[in-house]
Image (tube, rainbow, N blue to C red):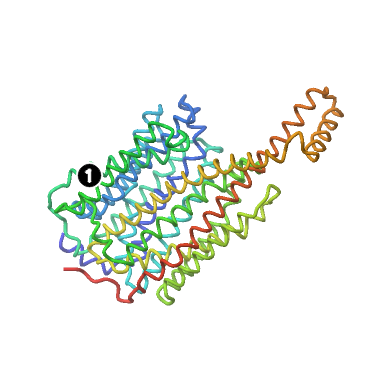
Amino acid sequence: MSSRPEAVPEINPWLIAIAVMSSTFMEVLDTTVVNVSLPHIAGSLSASTDEATWTLTSYLVANAIILPLTGWLAGRFGRKRLLLAAVTGFTIASFFCGLAPSLPFLIIFRVLQGACGGGLQPLSQAVLLESFPPQKRGQAMAFWALGIVVAPMLGPVAGGWLTDNYSWRWVFYINVPIGVLAILLTQAFVFDPPYLRREKTGIDYWGIGLLTVGMGSLQIMLDKGQEEDWFSSRLILSLAVIATVGLGGLIIRELLAEHPVIDLSVFRYRSYAVGTFLMTIVGFVLYGSTVLLPLLMQELLGYTATHAGVTNLPRGLASFLFMPVVGFLTGRVDARKLLAAGLLFTAGAMFRLSFFSLDVGFWNFWWPLMLQGAGLGLIFVPLTTVTNDPVPRERMGHATSIFNLMRNIGASVGISAVETLQFRNMQAHMNNLGRHVSDASLRTQQVVSGLEQMFRMRGVDAMTASRQAQGVVWARMEQQAAMLSYNDVFRFLGGMFLILLPLLLLMRKPTSKGPSIAH
């Protein structure tokens, strides 16, 4: 065992990067790849679409519980051993998800898949930050961010294509060869660093219990909130209380415990604390807009799922092309300046989208999404680098676990928030438009009369033509209200990024030497 750490410097860090990112990309892709397959899964397994959504919720709940435990698990069992176990478990669970004969069977293995996948993001980030020298960490984080940003955007496209051309089961089967490759690469190139000693301390059962109850309740609440009309539902209200008590108790417990499962002391580093908060908001906006745009395209503009996926590709393409450039600039240009540019770019993209109307075309989406993709590259890479810069290497696993957890929490809150805001704003706009579209309005009378004449010319009787004309006017008003509500939400997301700019002044400029080991 003692010879393994000595071999670490001999390995090209880019081989290590490929090894850890092959599994991480697969895991992040799985957070969105199943979405478009839900109707097919429901029909195949004799379940309703609402019941099938538990395949998403179960994955996210298990993922959220394991994420913050990753640093503690790596310290207890060894990082390489944990990484191999996670990839192996994820691959096996994916295979059995594809074989699922019933919905309960599928949900059980989605839970296992989520639990194994939860540790892959923080483990890969910690390994990359340690494998590259400080001056090249920007390039490493650019490579890492490619998977984190591009995979969720490719997920719906890949899932739709596999489902349409083969079967929803191939959404899971495709993970098996990738998982086997990741296992072989991890075994060959990833080793535990010499300063990462296994900890033989007591197990904080109270901390693990509070984490499980708190995070599980929070994730289910966020996932089902809009469907259950939020706090008018006794279920959602109960989940909110349990989540508040559980997570509040967890924070108190971890601050007082002798051997906590979550090391909250990393928040003593100011840059880390501010950066983690920023990443939470980035997750909110990124995943919120990722959900919002396909809904707008399919529900209002009549796009197919594949067409909507293709229309969203410019964002992923811009991130893919721009992140290597940002990785090169990080370390040469003050990361806080790159961050400011990224926030402004993304805010500008959101504000541009907020002026769209119902006659918007494919090419109108191109430049705002390209701008957002470039902005995300300017945010993810320097933010990850500057946030983790002051953290000692032996505590990097704990830091990356919390960092990724907060991004995922931001994503879950963002998805729930934008859906709720869009629905509530649509109702408000309907009421406002309804005051102007009435029988007393001369303009409304003219439009209805013109539609009635058109329907009568097609052979429809007068009474039916009147009903159809009023239905057309109502549907058009409903579409306009929906478009205005989408504009409101995009404006809200852009404003969120602008108010984050002053927080960059609280972050310290990264050092070229990087953190040292704390004794």
Residue 442 percent coordinates (x, y): 81, 39
Q: Is residue 301 above or below residue 452?
A: below
Asked whether 295 or 498 is in front, the reply is 498
Identify which residue is drawn at 67% across, 55% down. Answer: 363
Residue 330 percent coordinates (x, y): 42, 72
Disc 1 marks which amino acid?
Ile
Disc 1 packing (10 Å; few <14; some 14–19; many ≥20): many
> Helix or strand or loop: what does disc 1 sit on?
helix
Residue 504 percent coordinates (x, y): 41, 68
Residue 185 percent coordinates (x, y): 33, 55
Identify which residue is drawn at 51% across, 61% down. Answer: 319
- Quarter occupied by residue 164: top right
- Quarter occupied by residue 211: top left
Identify which residue is drawn at 30% across, 72% down. Answer: 514
For this view, does 343 lie left or right of residue 364?
left
Count of picture labels: 1
For this view, does 235 lie left or right of residue 260?
right
Q: Check disc 1 and report the residue beneath it.
A: 208
Q: Quadrant of the C terminus?
A: bottom left
Asked whether 195 or 365 is in front, the reply is 365
Q: Quadrant of the N terminus?
A: bottom left
Asked whether 234 or 224 is in front, the reply is 234
Asked whether 53 or 77 is in front, the reply is 53
Residue found at the far right of this picture: 457
